[in-house]
Image: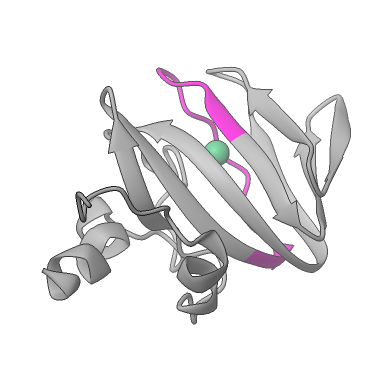
């Protein structure tokens, strides 16, 4: 049996996430990062000028606020925020999500906040695991 044929255990990956709003990279493909994160509360208004951003809710529910409305995503639902559109993710209760973004996307967009995590921070556990 080829040992590389292993599923990515999303529940275990998310259980290992201790910090809210801190994305954890679980896979990459075609220059895109697949990340998981735990959300609760309000994030920060920001935009990504060059990249679209996909949110997929794995557990719970979240809202994405826009300047002219908002979308609510429940478990099993996803949404792509178009590039250049200002948005603010909000989770009224703890929510587990998967994100798809190009490797060069800053998750807080053009805004640097206390919640901003570098890609090195988002992938640190992968180097530790070897
Ligand atoms: Ni964003």
Residue found at x 63% / y 38% = 55
- Ligand 1, what quadrant? top right
- Which secondary structure class fits the magenta region best? loop
Residue found at x 46% / y 65% = 22
Which residue of the protein is positioned furthest toward the front in this rendering?
A: 1
Apparent side of residue 51 relative to residue 59 in the rendered image (left or right): left
Is the image coloured rainbow, by chain, by secondary structure, or in one colour?
one colour
Would you say residue 85 is visible in this rendering?
Answer: yes
Let me know if residue 28 is in the magenta part: no
- Please state the horizontal and vertical placement of residue 83, each as a whole percent of the image: 53, 18
**Who is closer to the viewer here, 71 or 4?**
4
Task: Tell me: residue 4, above or below residue 24.
Answer: above
Task: Tell me: residue 60, above or below residue 68.
Answer: below
Tell me the quarter of the image containing the C terminus. Answer: bottom left
Task: Tell me: residue 81, above or below residue 46.
Answer: above
Apparent side of residue 41 relative to residue 71 in the rendered image (left or right): left
- Please state the horizontal and vertical placement of residue 128, each as a whole percent of the image: 15, 74
> What stretch of residues is rendered in magenta?
39-54
Residue found at x 42% / y 53% = 7
Count the labels in the image. Answer: 0
- Please state the horizontal and vertical placement of residue 73, each as a whole percent of the image: 83, 42
Residue 117: image quadrant is: bottom left
Apparent side of residue 13 relative to residue 122 in the rendered image (left or right): right
Residue found at x 36% / y 53% = 25
Let me know if residue 53 is in the magenta part: yes
Would you say residue 105 is visible in this rendering?
Answer: no
């Amino acid at each position: 049996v080829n040992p590389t044929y292993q599923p990515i255990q999303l529940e275990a990956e998310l259980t290992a996430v201790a910090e809210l709003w801190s994305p954890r990279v679980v896979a990459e493909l075609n220059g895109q990062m697949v990340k998981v994160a735990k959300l609760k509360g309000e994030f920060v208004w920001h935009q990504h000028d060059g990249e679209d951003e996909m949110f997929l809710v794995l557990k719970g529910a979240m809202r994405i606020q826009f300047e002219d409305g908002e979308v609510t995503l429940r478990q099993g639902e996803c949404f792509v925020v178009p590039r250049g559109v200002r948005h603010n993710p909000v989770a009224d209760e703890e929510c587990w999500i998967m994100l798809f973004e190009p490797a060069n996307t800053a998750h807080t967009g053009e805004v640097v906040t206390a919640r901003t995590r570098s890609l090195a921070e988002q992938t640190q556990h992968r180097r530790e695991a070897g």
